[in-house]
Image (tube, grey):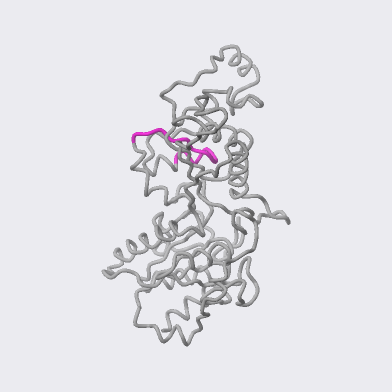
């Protein structure tokens, strides 16, 4: 699924990007004294289109591997283990065994959560997204992760409009008769990790806001019913802010950016304050910094002792891939391809350092110099 816009759903870019210098091949040739390069590829619209490979994308990755140039995939998708996503891309591209992508080369929107997992090693965190996200979180080191499905099953009164998942109506009726409407103090959460799109949005909005509005992560213990002196004590982390994405349907679908907007609006209405969110995914700088670190680790495995001093972000979305590379700054360079969302020319509204037909074209040009 291809992500489209940022959290606001608009196509606004700051003027400083509009004024950035446009780099051409002759300019690129003049800067070859910096020759430790790395690549980051978006997946949808760059390597794949739906469930089919984009022509020559397979060859682009093979050429980089042959030349021991570190590269990885950077996607705002998620919901699965990196090993599962890598296997999927390998199968679609039909990469030979010696050229297969490894889990370390797969950076999903929530992969950088690994960086702060140690801070919550012995603390409970609530996981929101498909149920597979629970296994993902535990693989990162969140040992006491609890999925929102499990929490709802234990405390069904938190959202009584519909019964918890996998519980029959008869069981639900019996549960209602046993309600104590109290939550065990040991079930407080230190943070909420919204890892992927919700499959039960109404419930998840309610329960997540219960935590965010609570006193130290225990729903039902509000700091102030009037919210006059409210201070947010339960951290909320979200993996991407894409407002829309394209699917097999002709009209775009809402992504996690819409969920973020809902949370912000409700929180603002109740408290008069801005919701504090620790945001990841493209185009956030923290995600690109994580990728830079990972590329240096991959380079070291290839026997490269120097740090990567130029990273090419190859993407098809000016407001995600390209904007993120510009936000991250040196050593990132943006490469806009025309195999996905973007089909036009380089202009002041959609700046990129390079605009090319496809990923293979840029890789072959790079290898020539």
Counting from the top left corner in percent of width and height, residue 41 is at: 49, 65
Q: Residue at x 56, y 27 (%)?
A: 225
Vertical relation: 58 (above or below) 119: below
Q: Residue furthest top?
A: 177
Question: x, y percentage for residue 130?
Answer: 55, 40
Where is 205 relative to 238, above or below? above
The spot of residue 203 in percent (x, y) is 61, 33
Viewport quadrant of the N terminus: bottom right
Residue 188 occupies quadrant: top left
Taking the view exactly as shown, the residue that stands out farthest to the right is: 250
297 within the magenta span: no
Total labels drawn = 0
Q: Where in the figure is residue 150, as x and y percent of width and height?
A: 51, 29
- What residue span does the magenta drawing correspond to? 122-135
| Residue 126 is a magenta residue | yes
Point 49% across, 50% down: residue: 279
The answer to whether residue 111 is above or below residue 292 is above
Classify residue 16 as left or right of residue 343.
Answer: left
43 on left or right of 301: right
């Amino acid at each position: 699924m291809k992500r489209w816009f940022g959290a606001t759903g608009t196509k606004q870019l700051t003027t400083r990007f509009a004024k950035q210098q446009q780099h051409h091949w002759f300019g690129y040739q003049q800067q070859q004294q910096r020759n430790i390069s790395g690549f980051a590829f978006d997946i949808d619209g760059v390597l794949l289109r739906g469930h089919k490979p984009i022509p020559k994308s397979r060859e682009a990755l093979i050429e980089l591997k042959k030349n021991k140039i570190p590269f990885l995939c950077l996607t705002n998708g998620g919901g699965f283990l990196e090993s599962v996503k890598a296997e999927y891309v390998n199968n679609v591209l039909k990469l030979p065994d010696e050229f297969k992508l490894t889990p370390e080369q797969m950076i999903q929107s929530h992969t950088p959560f690994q960086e702060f997992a140690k801070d919550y090693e012995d603390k409970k965190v609530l996981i929101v997204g498909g149920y597979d996200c629970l296994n993902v979180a535990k693989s990162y080191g969140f040992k006491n992760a609890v999925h929102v499905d499990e929490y709802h099953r234990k405390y069904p009164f938190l959202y009584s409009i519909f019964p918890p998942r996998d519980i029959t109506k008869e069981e639900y009726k019996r549960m209602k008769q046993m309600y104590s409407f109290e939550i065990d103090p040991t079930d407080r959460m230190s943070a909420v990790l919204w890892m992927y799109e919700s499959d039960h949005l109404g419930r998840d909005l309610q329960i997540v806001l219960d935590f965010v509005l609570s006193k130290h992560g225990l729903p039902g213990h509000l700091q102030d019913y009037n919210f006059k002196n409210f201070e947010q004590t339960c951290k909320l982390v979200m993996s991407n802010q894409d407002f829309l994405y394209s699917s097999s349907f002709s009209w775009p679908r809402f992504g996690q950016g819409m969920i973020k907007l809902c949370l912000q609006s409700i929180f603002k209405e109740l408290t008069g304050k801005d919701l504090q969110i620790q945001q990841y995914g493209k185009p956030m700088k923290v995600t690109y910094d994580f990728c830079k670190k990972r590329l240096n680790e991959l380079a070291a495995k290839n026997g490269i002792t120097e740090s990567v001093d130029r990273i090419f972000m190859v993407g098809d979305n000016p407001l995600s891939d390209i904007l993120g590379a510009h936000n991250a700054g040196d050593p990132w360079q943006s490469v806009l391809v025309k195999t996905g969302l973007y089909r036009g020319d380089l202009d002041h509204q959609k700046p990129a350092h390079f605009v090319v037909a496809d990923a293979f074209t840029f890789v072959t040009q790079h290898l020539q110099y």
